[in-house]
Image: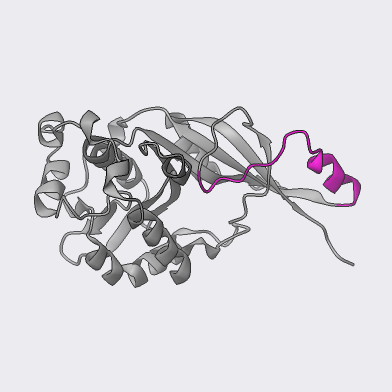
Amino acid sequence: MGYGLQTQGFDQSLLYGVAFNDPQSHLYELLSSVGYEVESEYTCVKVMEESWKKGNSLARNLKLCCLTLDELMEKVDDIVELARDSFSTLLPDTSGGGRENVLELIDLAISVPKPYFHHKICYDPYKHYSHIPEFIEAWKEADLENMITVFPMALERKTNRLVGMLIGVLDYYQYWNGNYISRVNVHTAMVRKGYNGMGIFSSLNNFGQATNRSMWGLTYYEGTAIWSKNSKGVNNDKAISSIFPHCKPIRRHVVFEKRLK
C-alpha cells in the first residue's frame, strides 16, 4: 500500500493496517547511505471532531447509505470504478482500488464477531441526530442489523450512482487481544470527479461516525496513508486542505526509491 518507513509517531498505539518499524533501527540512515532517496511522504491523521459543520447537509439530489453484504457485493464493480475515477495518476501507488483489494476490505469488515463491539455505550441515533434528516432517512431505509457500517456511501437519488465513499478497517489488534473494538483505520476516502466541494466527504465522515459510534461503539478514527508530497515538489494540497483542518497529524511515513542506471 505504499506506506514505507515510519519516521514519526512511534509513541502512538499500533493500528491495524498501518506500518510500524523499530525507531532505533536506523533504517533511514542506512537506506540513504546506499543511494536511496525519499520519493514520497505519507501522513496519518487523528480525526479530532465527531461532526464537521460542512457535513450536516447534503445536496438534495444525493443520499447517504450503508449497505448489507449482499447489496455491497453488487456494488463492487462500482467501487472499483469510483476508485479509478477518484485517485490521481500522480499517486505513487494506485493499487488500492483493485477488485481483489476491495473484496479483502469487505472481508475485514465482516469477520469480527458481534460480541467484540461495545454495545453498552451506544445511544439512540434517531434522537441524537434528529436535526439531520439525511441521517434519519438513511437509517430508516437500511437493514440496521446487517448493514456494513464502515462502508458509508453517497449515491445519486435518481440513478443510484455511487459518487462518494469511505472505507474503514477495524482495529484487529484489539480483537486479537480480546478487547472491544473501538478504533477504525479510515483506509480510503473517495469522491467522484465533478462532485468535489459539495460537502460529500464531510457528510460521509459525519454519517459514518454517527452510525458507528451509536450502533457499534467505535469512537477512534484515524485517516491513514494520506499522500502529502513527493520529491518533485508536488504537494497533495487538496487532501491537506480538506482533511487536515479537522485532524491532527500523528504519524508520518516515507517511501524511498533508487534509480537504476
User: Is any atom of residue 73 visible in this view?
Assistant: yes
Across and down, in percent, residue 16 comes to 50, 45
Residue in view at x 36 percent, y 57 percent: 194
**Residue 88 colored in magenta in the image:** no
**Residue 30 colored in magenta in the image:** yes
Q: Quadrant of the C terminus?
A: bottom right
Residue in view at x 16 percent, y 44 percent: 134
Across and down, in percent, residue 14 comes to 55, 37
> Which residues fall within the magenta stretch?
16-35
Residue in view at x 88 percent, y 52 percent: 35
Q: Is 151 drawn above or below residue 162 in the view shown?
A: above
Displayed quadrant of residue 197: top left
Q: Is the magenta stretch mostly helix, strand or loop?
A: loop
**Left or right of residue 145, residue 80 in this image:** right
Q: Choose between 37 and 6: the one closer to the eye.
A: 6
Displayed quadrant of residue 54: top left
Q: Choose between 248 and 20: the one closer to the eye.
A: 20
Q: Quadrant of the N terminus?
A: bottom right
**Left or right of residue 210, residue 126 in this image:** left
Residue in view at x 39 percent, y 64 percent: 82
Q: Is 70 drawn above or below residue 16 in the view shown?
A: below
Across and down, in percent, residue 32 comes to 85, 45
**Left or right of residue 65, residue 127 in this image:** left
Across and down, in percent, residue 56 comes to 23, 36
The chosen color scheme is: one colour
User: Is any atom of residue 195 visible in this view?
Assistant: no
Name the outermost residue toward the front: 178
Q: How many labels does the image show?
A: 0
